[in-house]
Image (tube, rainbow, N blue to C red):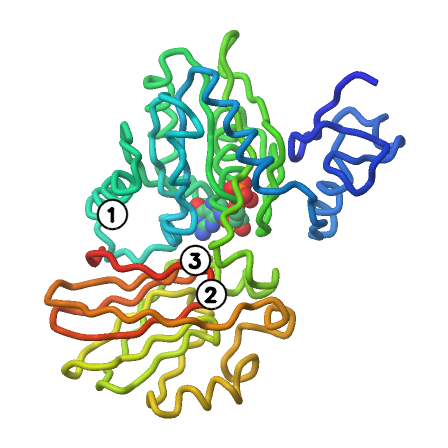
Amino acid sequence: MDKIQCQGCGAEIQTTHPELPGFAPESALQKEDVICKRCFRLQNYNEVQDIPFNDDDFLEMLNQISHNQGLIIQLVDIFDFNGSFISGLKRLTGNNPVILVGNKIDVLPKSVNPNKLKDWLRRSAKQQGLQVEGVYLISAEKNLGVEELAKVLDKERKEKDVYIVGTTNVGKSTFINTLIQNTSGIKEAITTSYFPGTTLGFIDIPLDEKSSLYDTPGVIQRHQMAHYVSDKDLKLITPRKEVKPKVYQLNEKQTLFFGGLARLDFEAGERTSFICYFSNELPIHRTKLEKAEELYENQIGKLLSPPNDKTLKQLPSLTGRTFKINEKKTDIVFSGLGWVTIPEGNVSVTAYVPEGVKVSLRDSLI
Ligand code: GDP
C-alpha cells in the first residue's frame, strides 16, 4: 500500500492496528480525502480516542527539525504561558530562528496593554533560555493579527520552511486553518478540537515550489491543567469570550476558591482588592480562611465545582505555595486557569493548585 496521510491529523494511515494512530478501515481508503478513524469520530461525534503516543515520541519528532533549516514559530496560549511554553525548544530545534506568537488575545480583557504583554513574553522566554526574533499577538480563531504575521513569516523565512510548534491545545490547528483560509478560502482544512493531542505527525502545507509550512505534533506538557480535568470541565475553564474581571475586597484571613480547582488564601496584609481573571463561567467563592478546609472537604465537586465527578477521579490533591508580595502590582498566575492581580502593597498569600500544575508571579499586565 502506498503511504497515505490522514487529512485530519497527518498520521500515516494503516488498516491493521485499530489501537494505533492512523487506523482506518479498508473501506475508508476508497475516499479521495482519507481520514483516520480517530479524526472521523472527532469530526462527526466530537469524540476523542486516546492515543498511545508518549511524550518522548513527540519530542523525538520535534527533534527532527534541528536537522533541517527553517523558521520556527512557537505558538503559546497567552492565558497559559507557563503551561504552554516549551522551554527546551533551542535544544530541540537547533539554531533556527524562533518567532514567539501569543495566541487567543480575543479572550484577554481590553485593559491588558499589548506592549506590556509582548515585553513580558519576550522576557519570560529569555529567562527560560530562548532568545526570540520577534513577538506577535494573534487570535487564530478571530483572525486577528494573522495576516500581519503571515507577511512577517513570508519575509523572515527567507525562502526556507516554516515549522509551527507548540504544546497541545495552544491553537496550532486553528492558526493553520486561518492561514489557509486567508489565502485559499478553504475552511477547516485540518482538524481542531478542544482536546489535547489532536495533531499527530507532521502536516505539510506547500508555501512555494521548494518550501513548506509544517504543523508539528503538539508536545504534551504534563503540568497543563488540561491534562487533569475532564473534557466538560476543560470547556468550562477555557475562556471563550473576553474575560470579565471580578473584584473582591478582602481582609486578611479570607480565602477565594476558583471552583474547587484552585484556592488563594490572603494570609496577611492590609484590606485590599483581588482582581480575578478567569473564564466567566468559573464560579468564585469567598470564605473565611478558618473555614476553608472544611468547606473544601464538604463541598468539593458540589458548591466548589468544577471539578465534576469525572475530573474528581483523576485530580491530584491541592498543594499550596506561599508568596510574599512587596510593593509592585503583581499577578499570581494559576497555569491554565487564569490569574489574580494584587495592587501595590505588602501582602502574603498562599496559592493552591492540583499538584503538578504551576503557580507563578509576574509584574501585572494591567
Ligand atoms: P492545537 O492542539 O494546538 O492544534 O489546538 P487547536 O487548534 O485544536 O485549538 C485548541 C482549542 O483552542 C480549541 O478549542 C480552539 O477552538 C481554541 N482556540 C484556538 N485558537 C483560539 C483563539 O484565537 N481564541 C480562542 N478563544 N480560542 C482559540
**Residue 101 percent coordinates (x, y):** 36, 37
Q: Is mark 3 within 8 Å of ligand 1?
A: no
Judge whether 178 appears above or below 67 on screen.
below
In depth, the one of 6 and 15 nearer the eye is 15
The residue that mark 2 highlights is 355
Q: Is residue 6 left or right of residue 275?
A: right
What amino acid is labelled 3 in the image? Answer: Gly
Tag 2: amino acid: Glu
Q: Quadrant of residue 2?
A: top right
Single out the mark in the foreground, 1 or 3: 3
The answer for how far apart the CA atoms under marks 2 and 3 are is 13 Å
Vertically, is 259 above or below 101?
below
Taking the image as shown, residue 246 lies to the left or right of residue 68, namely left
Q: 157 above or below 264? A: above
Q: Quadrant of residue 252?
A: bottom left
Could you tell me residue 360's position as x and y percent? 31, 59
Q: Nearer the viewer, residue 98 or 315?
A: 315
The residue wearing badge 3 is: 336
- Chain-order first, disc 2 or disc 3: 3
Q: Residue furthest right?
A: 27
In front of the other: 125 or 121: 125
Task: Pick whichever of labels 2 and 1 is earlier in the sequence.
Answer: 1
Disc on res. 96: none
* Other residues around mark 2 within 10 Å, as few (<14) / some (14–19) / many (≥20): some
The secondary structure type at the circle numbered 1 is: helix
Name the foreground residue: 183 vs 202: 202
Q: CA distance from mark 2 to mark 1?
A: 27 Å
Which element is circle 3 on? loop
Instruction: Please give left or right for residue 343 compared with residue 213 in the image.
Output: left
Q: Which mark is residue 117?
A: 1
Residue 258 location (% of width, % of height) = 42, 74
